[in-house]
Amino acid sequence: MTSIWVDYLDREFLDNEFRELVNKGLVNGLTSNPAIFANALKKDVYKEDFEKLKGRSAKEIYEEIAVKDIQKACDVLEPLYDEGEDGYASIEVDPRLINDAKGTIDEALRLVDKIERDNVMIKIPANEAGYKAMEELAKKGININATLVFSPNQAMRALEAISKGPGTIDGVISVFVSRFDRKLNPELAMQNLAKDRIGFFNAIKIYNQIEEKRLSNIRALFASTGVKQSYLPKDYYVENLYLPHSVLTLPLDVIEEIKNKELEDSFHFQTKHIDAFFGFLTPAGISMQKVYKELFDEGVSAFEDAFNNMLNSIKG
């Protein structure tokens, strides 16, 4: 089965459109991140919360609101979770804890205790501190969403960490897709190499590695699936990454694009064919290892900036 999770959240959406999407069977999960919450909290629907929480620290105010929203999302999704049809809502730990394993574990446990929902997933960045946190949290029975995954090595390290937990927990490994193409398309064009391929080729290569482990409770999740190139259809990455035993997390405009379509399984590229394409990159001066690191660093920086800006706006 291929699952569709919505990559969006705000209070008004949760009370209205999200319920409709779930009831119509169009989505069976939800993901959030610091940037999504930063945009959500600009909306008037949160004014009452800010008034009630006045006097608390910006981080405490954010956390109270975020917990409330994730609880609401979990409650909407609970019937799906009870039926074994996913039904997960993800919340990310403070991105400023990126290199603090203990801080990440403590924050994750606090969020799980406050949210009090079995169908919550905790998002943790895939780096050295993150792998340690994933392993400890998985052992405690917490569902894990390994995020900011760009490289096969990150994916395998995350999978190894999550698999230390009992088979009763669920884990997803969030492979970011479109950022590769936005970053590399200009260089590929100059080298007369095909554009808009590296993102989904890399994602499928990682998907293949995850599936080779045959762990029913750990799946690839394809993230960063919004299309910025005007010449591509909005559902470009859905067309290329609709694969069994995986999750596609999609922004609202992509969900709107696919909601009346009959989705078909994508062509499943073998790793050897992907590696053959990647073989053209090194002679063209493109190092995938360098790209992996740059994209991870850029992703961490973007989430930290969004989180800090949000906290600053809460302070007023």
Image: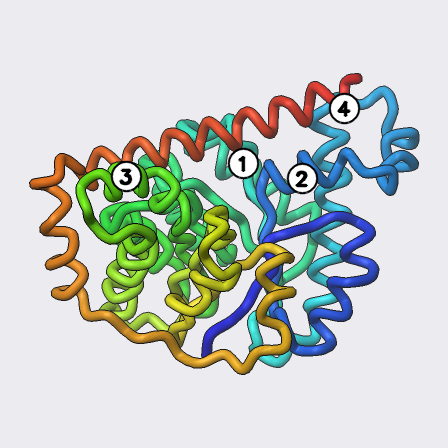
Alpha carbons under labels 3 and 1: distance apart: 28 Å
Q: Which residue is mark 3?
A: 292
Which amino acid does the dot numbered 4 rest on? Ile
Considering only order in the chain, which callout, 4 or 1, is on the residue closer to the N terminus?
A: 1
Give the percent coordinates (x, y) of residue 240: 38, 67
Q: Which residue is mark 4?
A: 314
SS at badge 4: helix
Alpha carbons under labels 1 and 4: distance apart: 23 Å
Which amino acid does the dot numbered 1 rest on? Asp
Please tell me whether mark 3 or mark 4 is closer to you in this view: 3
SS at badge 3: helix
Q: Nearer the viewer, residue 159 or 229?
A: 229
Is residue 208 shown left or right of residue 141?
left
Q: Which residue is mark 2?
A: 37
SS at badge 2: helix
Q: Which residue is mark 1?
A: 106
Q: Quadrant of the C terminus?
A: top right
Give the percent coordinates (x, y) of residue 141: 49, 58
Alpha carbons under labels 3 and 4: distance apart: 33 Å
